[in-house]
Amino acid sequence: MKEYSVINTRVPRVDGRAKATGKARYADDLSMPDMLYGALLQSPVAHARIRKIDTSKAKKLPGVKDVVTAQEAGAVKFGVSPARYDETIFCIDKARYVGDEIAAVAAVDLETALEAAALIEVEYEELPVVLDPFEAIKEGAPVIHEDFPNNIGAEVHQEFGDVEEALKTCDLVRTDKFVNKKQDGAFLEPQACLAFYDPGRGLTLYSSTQAPHYVQRTLAMVLGLPIGKVRVAQPCVGGGFGPKASASTLELTTSLMAIRTGRPVKMAFTREQVFWHSRARHQFFHELTTGVKKDGTLVALKNTCYLDGGAYSSFGIATVYYAGSLLGAPYRLPNMKYDGYRIYTNKPANGAQRGHGGVAARAAWEQQLDIIAADLGMDPIEFRLKNIMQRGDITCNDFNMSSLGMKECLEAVRSGSGWDKKKGKLPRGKGIGVACGFFVSGAGFPIYRSETFHSTAVIKLSEDGGTVNLYTPAAEIGQGSDTVLTQIAAEALGVRYGDVKVSSGDTDFGVDLGAYSSRQTLMSGHAVKQAAEEARRQVLEVLSEQLNIPVEEMDIKDGLVLFKKEGVDFSALRTRYIKEHRGWTDPPSGKHFTFVEAARLAYLARGTIVGTGAYKPGELGGKYKGAAVGTSPAYGCSAQVVEVTVDMETGQVTVDKMTDAHDCGFAINRTNVEGQMQGSLSMGLGEALFEEVKFDGGGRVANPTLGEYRIPTCLDMPNVETIIIESNEPNGPFGAKEVGEGAIMPTIPAILNAVYDATGVRINELPVTSERVFDRLKEEKERRKEV
Amino acid sequence: MKKLITLIVNKRAFEVAVEPNRTLAQVLREDLGFLGTKVGCGIGDCGACTVVVDGRPVNSCLVLAVQVNGSEITTIEGVSEGAELHPVQEAFVEYGAIQCGFCTSGMILSAKTLLDRNSNPSEPEIRAALSGNLCRCTGYQKIVEAVHAAAGMMKK
Ligand code: FES
Ligand code: FES
C-alpha cells in the first residue's frame, strides 16, 4: 500500500483546541451591534382552524420592532422534497400540531420578545385530533392536509423478483411485526440563528444547520430573493444527526424580520422547542415475512411498513423509501417486495435521523434472521456468513457493492468478542447477540432535481507560499469533516497537516449538499482532493518550467519537493526566494527544496494559485421508481456483537460490552472513525433501551426535556471494542467511504438478540424497558405452565 | 430590582448589577461574555453549563447569580493560562474526546474538579463524576480515556 503522511493517522481535530478552551462560537454565542431578539408564537393545540390573529397589543409593547404572521410572511410553500412542499413559514388557516408556528416577534431584548409573543391573541376553532396513524387512515378520520384526504402523504410499492412465487419454494417462512418509538435527535445545542440584511450585499444567515446549501435555496425561494443575494454560513454546530438538515421556520422568520427591520435578528430554540420542532426519527410499524431454504439460503423478503409522519412531510418521502430499500443487503437476497405508507398525524413532523429510514427496519429484520437461524439450528453468525454479499455483488434493487468488507466485519466481531466461547454457553440472565447492517455513502442524487455537483472545493495557496487555504462549503457539525477534509487536502497536495487552513460551511465557498446521508468524506473529500491535486499540478508545472525537469520526475511530500533524479540544482531558485523575503524570519534551508518556495515561485510566475474541485456521482444503478433513494456510489457496512445482563426479577437490561467492526473503506482519521462508531452505538443503545418521545391525548409532547426523555449517560454506555475494517472503496477518495450513520445499524438488533439469548423472550416493541421485559418474561412463564 | 454583586470569575473580580431572577449562566454569558459556558437545556438536565463554584461543579443554569455573590467561579476560559493547555484540555484534544464540542466545556470542568480531588480515579469514579454531563456525540468512551490520560499527565 502507498505510504501516507497525513491520512490514516490520528491527528487531532482542527477545531479541538478552540472547543477545549471555550473559544469556539456557536450560533447562540453570536451577537451584533443593534441586534434584535426573536421569539415565536406556536400553536398550543394540535389541530385547529385559525379564525383570527390579533397582534395589536404585541405591536404596542415598547421595545417591539416587528411582529409577523402569515399575512406578512406569505404563502410560499417549502419543505424538503419539492414533490411534497407542504409547509409555509406560518400557519395560514390551520395549525396541525402543538408547536406549529403562528407568529413571531423581534424586540430589543428576549424578555420583551417573549412578552410580546404572549400578547398575540389567536382565535382557534379546535378540530378533531388524530395522533395514531392507523386511526388516521380510517374512513372519516380528520383530514390534516386537504390534498391528502386519506392522510397518506406518500406511498411506495416496489417488487424485485417475484416474492409470492419465491416464498412457495421456501422450507421456512415466518412473519413478525416490529415497532420502534419516535426518537429525538437530542443534539446538545438547540437550533439557533442570526440574520442580517444589507440592501446591496443581500441577506446573511448564520445558522446551526447541517445543510447551508438547502437553507440558502429555501430562503431565496420563500423570501423571494435572488439566490446570489443569500448567504448561509455555519458557526460551530453542536451536533445535528438529521433534524438540522432542512430549512426551518426559525431560519426563515429570523431572516424575514432582519430584512423587514434592517437590523440583525437572533432567535434560538429552547430545549422544549427542539422537541416540538422534532424532524427526527419516525415511528415505524413493520411487518416482515422472510423465507429461507433448509440449508439457510435466504430466498425472499416481504416488507410492509406504516410510518407515523407527523404533521408535515419533512424528509419523509426519502424516509418511506429508505424503510424498504435499506433491507436485503448485506445479504444475497433475490426477491424483495416492499409496501410503505407515510401517514400524516397531528404530531411534530418526523424527518431524518442517523441511519435514515433504515434503523427500525434493520432492527426488525436482524431479529427475525436470528429467530430463523435458531429455527434452522444454525449459529447466527454462520447463518449470516452463508448469505453474505461480497465486493462486486449487486443487490436485487440494484445497489452496487463496489467494496464490502462485510464478511471481514463479521469475522472480526466473532473473534473480538470471543463469540464461539460464549454463544449458547452463558448462564440465564446473560446473553450475547449479533447483527449486521449497511448504509449509503451519500445519496446518489440531490434532494431537488438537478445536474448540480454535490460538492465543490477551492484551494488557494497564499501568495507568500506558506499557507494552503481550503474553502469548502461542506458542513462541519461535530462529526469532524473539517479535520478529514484538511487531511485530504494536505495529503493530496503533499504538505503537512498544519499547513492547511480550512474554512467551511459557507455558501459563498460553493455548493455542497451538506452533512446528511453520510456523504461528506466521500463526496466533499473527492472535491477537495481534486482541488488539491489541481493546485499541486500548477506548482509543479512552474517548477518544471524553471528547472527544466518534467513534472513526472517531481513529487511533493511533507512540504518538500522531491526529485526523482539526484543532484538537481535549485540554488538559483532558492536565492530568488530568499531575496524576495528579505527580513523574514524563516528563510528556507536544508537539502530539500520546500513547497513554500515552490508555491511562492508559482505565484510569481502565474499570479494567485487556485485549484478547484467538483464531484458528483457517476452513473448509478436502478431505473425503477424510487431508485434515487438508496443508490449511492458506495456502501459502508458493519457488524456488532453485544453482551447484556438482564435482571430476571425486574427485567432491567444492562449492556455490558459491545464489539463493533465497521468497514469505512479507508480511515482518513482513525480516531474520528472510532468516534463515529462509538457515538452511533450510543444513540442506538438509547433508542433500544429507553428513548421515546411521548404524547398526551391532546398531542402535546409529554416529556420535552432531556431529563424525562433520557439519552444515555456515561453510566449507561459500556466500553466498545472498535475494529476498523478497510476494504478500499474504488469510488471513494483514497478508498474512503462512510461511517457516520451506518455504524448505528446493527446496534438495536444486536441488543435485542442478546436480550433473547439472556432471557428466551423476544421483544418486538422498543424501547426495551424493564417493564416490557418483565411482562414478556411473565407471559412466557404462564405459557410454559399451560403447556 | 437590580442587586449589585461581586463574582470572582477566573481570578478576576467583576461587579455586576443583576436582576434577582437571572441565572449564573445568563450573567456569565450575557453580562460578562464568558460564552464558553453553554446552555443545552436551561433546567439542569444536561450539564453543558457546568462551571466550578468554590471548588464544586454546578449547573450554572440552576443557580441564581445573586446566590453566588462573592464566590470564586471557574469557567472554561479560566482552565488554561496563556497558550498552554491544561492537561485535561490537552488530553481531550489528543484522545478524540471532542466532537461537536457543545458538552466539552462542562465535561472538562467536571473532569478537572474530579482530578483536583482525586489524582488517580478509577473508571467507575470517572464515570460517576461525569454522569451529570450529557454527550450525544462521543458515546463517552474517548472522554473517559482522556480523563485517565490527563490524570497520568498531571502526575508527571
Ligand atoms: S444548560 Fe444547565 S444543565 Fe443543561
Ligand atoms: S461532543 Fe457533542 S455533545 Fe459531546
Image (cartoon, coloured by chain):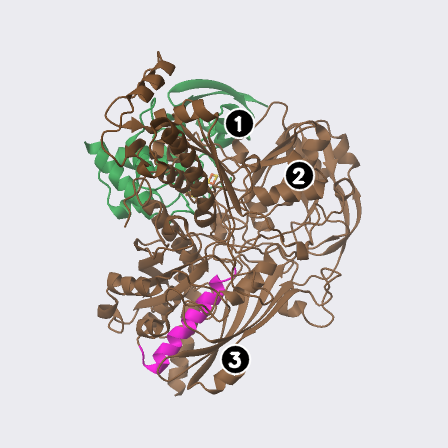
Residue under numbered circle 3: A163
**Residue A552 x %, y %:** 34, 39
Say whether residue B41 is visible. Answer: no
Q: Which chain is green?
A: B
Label for residue A227?
Answer: 2
SS at circle 2: helix
SS at circle 3: helix
Asked if the residue at label 1 sits under 8 Å from ligand 1, the reply is: no
The residue nearer to you, when weighing A609 against A207, is A609
Q: In 3D space, how far apart are the residues under numbered discs 3 and 1 (Cα atoms)?
A: 62 Å
Per the rendering, the colour in which chain A appears is brown
**Residue B133 x %, y %:** 40, 43
Please count the marks in the image: 3
Q: Extreme top residue here?
A: A583
Magenta segment includes A375: yes
Residue under numbered circle 1: B30
Q: Which corner quadrant of the image does residue A370 belong to?
A: bottom left
Q: Magenta stretch?
A: A357-378
